[in-house]
Image (cartoon, helix red, strand yellow):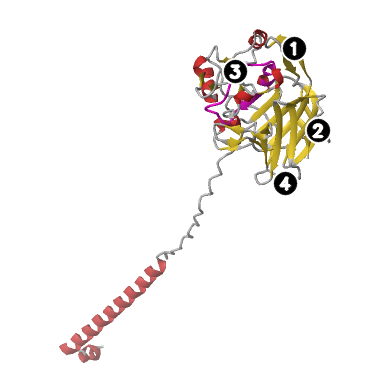
Amino acid sequence: MTDFFTRFKSPHTWITIGLIVLLAGSVAFVGWAIHDSRQSAEAAPVETVVEEELETVKPPPPPPPPPTYFCPLDGTEYADRDITLKRAVVVQVDNAPAARPQIGLGLADIVYEGMAEGQVTRFSAVYLCRDAEVVGPVRSARLINLELVPEYQALLANSGASTGVNNAIAADPNVPNMNHGTYPSAYWRVSDRYAPHNLMTSTSVIRQMAAEAGMPVQVELDGPFFKADAAVPGTLSYISIPYSPWADVSYNYNPADNNWLRFIQGEPHMDAGTSTQLTAKNVIVQYVNSYESNIKEDENNYGLIFDLTGTGRLLVFRDGEVISGTWSRPSLGAITTYLDDSGSPIQLNQGPTWIQLVPTEFPSVTWG
C-alpha cells in the first residue's frame, strides 16, 4: 500500500491523474448529454403535415330560362304574364263599303264576321294580347254581343244600339257596355271619312275607362288548343264565302308565310292602319242557327240572332288544308271547343283567327 502512494508522490503525477479524471468526466457528461438529447428527440411528438385536399369549386348552375306565357286567344308567346291577363275588348267594326278599309283589324286576336242588315256583314273584333291604339270605324252593338262578350269575359266597345238591343245589354251583367254615349272620351271622329263611318276608339283607352269606372281589367281565360305551323304546306289555294253581292269574302292561301290572305269583293282587304293586307293563320267557318229577332234595327230590318251555344258543323282551314268537325259550347260562360270528325281537339296555328259565321243551311262555302 505504501508502495502505491509512494509511486504517485510526484506532483506532476497527480496533476496528470486529475486531468485524466477531468477529461473522463467531461467525456462522460458529453455522452450523457448526447444520449439525453437523443432520448428527448425520440420522445418529442412528430408533427405530421398532411396536405389538405383542395376542394373542387363547381360553377353555379345556370339560371333557369325565364318563363314564357301564352296568349289564350292566339297562342303567341310573351315573357310578361300581365299581357296574357288583360281583359279582352270586343269592338263592333263597320263593314259597309263606305267603311273600308278598316283600321286596326289586323291586330285583333280573333275576328268574327256575320251578316247584319242591308246585305252587309259586321265584325266583332276581339283584342286581348295585342292592343289597337286606333280601331274602327266603330258601329252599333247587335244581339250577337250578348253571345260573344260573355265567352271572353270582355268589355264591349260600340257606337250605341237600338232601343231593344240596349235594353237587352243593360239587363245582362255579363256584358259591360263601354259605348260611345256613356264613355265619349274613349272615342273620336276622323276627318277623312264621312259619318257614321268615321268613329274610332282605342282598346287600351277602353280598358283605362273601365278601370276608372271600377271594373276589373285583368281576367284569366282559357282558349283553344294551339300548335306550331306544319312543316309542309297543304294543297288548297282558296276559300270562298259569298255572303252577299256587297260582302263577297274569299281567302287565298300563301304557302310562303303559311297564312290566308283576305279579299273582299275580289280585292285585297287592307288594314288602313298598316297599309297591309289582312291575313289569318286560321279561318274557321262555323255553321250556326241564325234568324230574325223581334227587335227593329231600322225601318226595314229586324236584328239577327246567332245561336253560339250548343253544337254545330265546323270547317277549319289551316296549313293549306281543311279539317271538318263540330264546334261545341255548353253555356254562355264557356269557351267554344273545336273537334274533328274523330272527336279529337283541333289544334290551331299560333296567330290571328277569323271566324266566319254562316247559317246552317248556307250552301255556298267552297274551297279548292
Residue assigned mark 2: 325
User: Residue 170 bears which disc, if any?
Assistant: none
Q: Is residue 125 left or right of residue 235?
A: left
Distance from the alpha carbon under mark 2 to that under mark 4? 20 Å
User: What span is colored magenta in the figure?
Assistant: 123-148
Q: Determine the secondary structure under disc 2.
A: strand
Residue assigned mark 1: 293
Disc 2 or disc 3, which is closer to the eye?
3
Amino acid at circle 4: Pro
Answer above or below: position of 114 versus 41. above
For the stretch drawn in magenta, the main secondary structure is: loop
Q: Quadrant of the N terminus?
A: bottom left
Query: Splitting the image into 4 quarters, where does residue 14 fall?
Result: bottom left
Seen at 66% across and 34% down, the residue is 267
Q: Determine the secondary structure under disc 4.
A: loop
Residue assigned mark 3: 158
Tell me whether the residue at label 3 lies in contact with that at label 1, contact meaning CB atoms closer than 8 angstroms. Answer: no
Answer above or below: position of 202 versus 51. above
Residue assigned mark 4: 233
Answer above or below: position of 282 versus 147. below
Q: Quick check: is 142 in the magenta stretch?
A: yes
